[in-house]
Amino acid sequence: MAETTLAPPEVQAETLLDSNELVLNMGPQHPSTHGVLRVILKLDGETVLGTDCVIGYLHRGVEKIAENRTFQQFAPYVDRMDYVAAVSNGLGYCMAVEKLLDAEVPPRAQAVRVILTELNRIASHLLWLGTHALDIGAITPVFLCFREREEVLKIFENYCGARLTTHAFRIGGLQYETYDTFEKQCLDLCDLMEQKLKEYHDLLTGNRIWVRRTKGVGILNAADCKDYGVTGPLIRAAGIEWDLRKAQPYCGYENYDFDIPTAETGDTFDRYMVRMEEMVQSCRIIRQAVDALPEGPIKGKVGKVIKPPPGEAYVSIEAPKGELGYYIVSDGSLNPYRVRVRPPSFVNLGALDKMCRGSLVADVVAIIGTIDIVLGEVDR
Amino acid sequence: MPDTPNSDDKPRPAPSARPPAAAGADRPVRRPVPKKPAEMPCEPWEGALPAALQERFSDRLSRVVLLGGQKLLVAEIAAAFEILSCLKQEHGFDYLVDVTAVHWPDKPEQFEIVWTLYSFSANERVRLKAGLAEGQPVPSATALYSSANWLEREVYDMFGIEFQDHPDLRRILMPDEWEGFPLRKEYGIVQQDSDWVRENLKIESAQ
């Protein structure tokens, strides 16, 4: 038997430990991946060395479908991308087609659009808050958030009959006039939210476990946000006061008085605080829009047949998750020649690897939650 | 055979006679409403930035326009990386919003790559387009913007356009072994990679 010579103990320990790179497969069927996201984690003990996202499980070829539908027929499909913020998806699409048509939207339609989109922002953030807290281990918030989200969905249901995939807007304006108690219900919801947000703050903001699980976790600074194209609450939490509703106002957002909440460090806690404050600001916008809701027509002069001239346009809005853009190319026919959706979730998820490196396995769950992805939008 | 007004052997009855011209002479003549222009409004883009770009890239930059009010540059594909780099380093376009492509199968340059850029300091958006033929190399923007990584992977996945010097060019939404590029125009809407479906899903068809 050959004699084996062992390396000195210190070298031995180092090589043995270093060679133990563990590959852990998380998802696609994992409760905290918010759908069907698969993350392959490279670990050294508890520390993440790198990640690789496998996406596409929900790919339905939305952009391909668009080329085979007319402009109107495609409108309900966009709701199925970010299905927790369907109203925002619809708004972006309608605005892009209106840009191609050079169509005017009447003031009343603009104001109702603002109200519904802001309500949707609240609903989207509530869903995020509930599930994010649940991922981290706080079970109560999810019930409270769903309770309040229900009130928002009731308004949608009363307005257009659908709760989730609303298809609330039409190219050129709105399909439906508001119902009798619309204004009152919106104002009641604002009152309710302001009261309930205090409840969430009581539960989480000062909670030591919550703070320890979120402060300093998944930091993405301002320079990295720009580099990775990350937008929405993530970039605001890193200290950049940038919101498309202020930077390039649409739908008359320039008429409303609201603030852009920001934070300093860009960690998970900051993003939590930014989103909480955004709900307050949304309530402010809703109140102003309801108070000054103009009378008048709800649909602009758009023909029954929508046939934009050949050309192209890129229109983007501030969706709850970040910059949602539509790049539409028209060849002058009834169907769009090409529809490209610039999804905020997809681009933001691209920074997951950067945010996870060097953190612990348990924090990966917190980081996925804090990006606020909807896989329907990531995969389209 | 019933005598229908549409039968071939009998011409349609003439439309009811119009009122004689004299009766309606004092009515204003209805002219057709002028149709909207059939093209998007396109005007030259003027200012310091387009002037600087035109001076530096001259004939490699074929169009510098405002298309429907949106800033648009059209360039040669060989100059694209240099233009992107110039826009980022010298003009502050620090956010690559989107990379995508459009397929025009009838044109000699089949594909059009579209980069959308934004500058936080100037609150300005610019779109850069470049055409390329099948198999022509495209420089990857990953060296300039990290966001280009996934966006270019999607373009590769959907159109089969290969980006040079991309660190990790593989499919992103479709399965790795999938045949064909779904967003090309010749790819049918219900087309699938039947071999892949049979092998991986153990069913005859996924439709």
Image: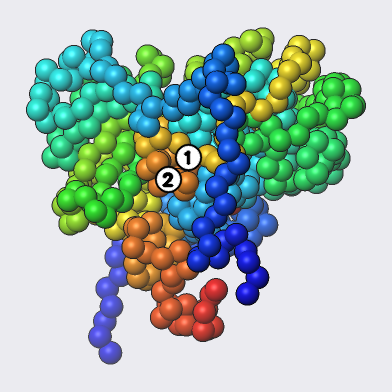
| Mark 1 in CB contact with mark 2 (< 8 angstroms) | yes
Residue corresponding to mark 2: A333
Point out which mark residue A307 bears: 1
Does residue A185 show up?
A: no
User: Where is residue A321, by image quadrant?
Assistant: top right
Callout 2 amino acid? Ser
Relative vertical location of residue A158 with respect to residue B123 in this rendering, above or below:
below
Q: Please give the chain letter of the residue carrying mark 1.
A: A
Q: Separation of disc 1 and disc 2 at Cα?
A: 6 Å
Could you tell me residue A225's position as x and y percent? 44, 30
Q: How crowded is mark 1: few (under 14 residues within 10 Å), some or many (20 or more)?
A: many
Which residue is rendered at x = 21% and y = 43% of the image?
B131
Q: How many labels does the image show?
A: 2
**Residue B149 placement, left or right of A328:** left
Which residue is rendered at x = 58% and y = 49% of the image?
A73
**Residue B54 placement, left or right of A121:** left
Callout 1 amino acid? Lys
Point out the tag, 1 or 2, that comes first from the N-terminus: 1
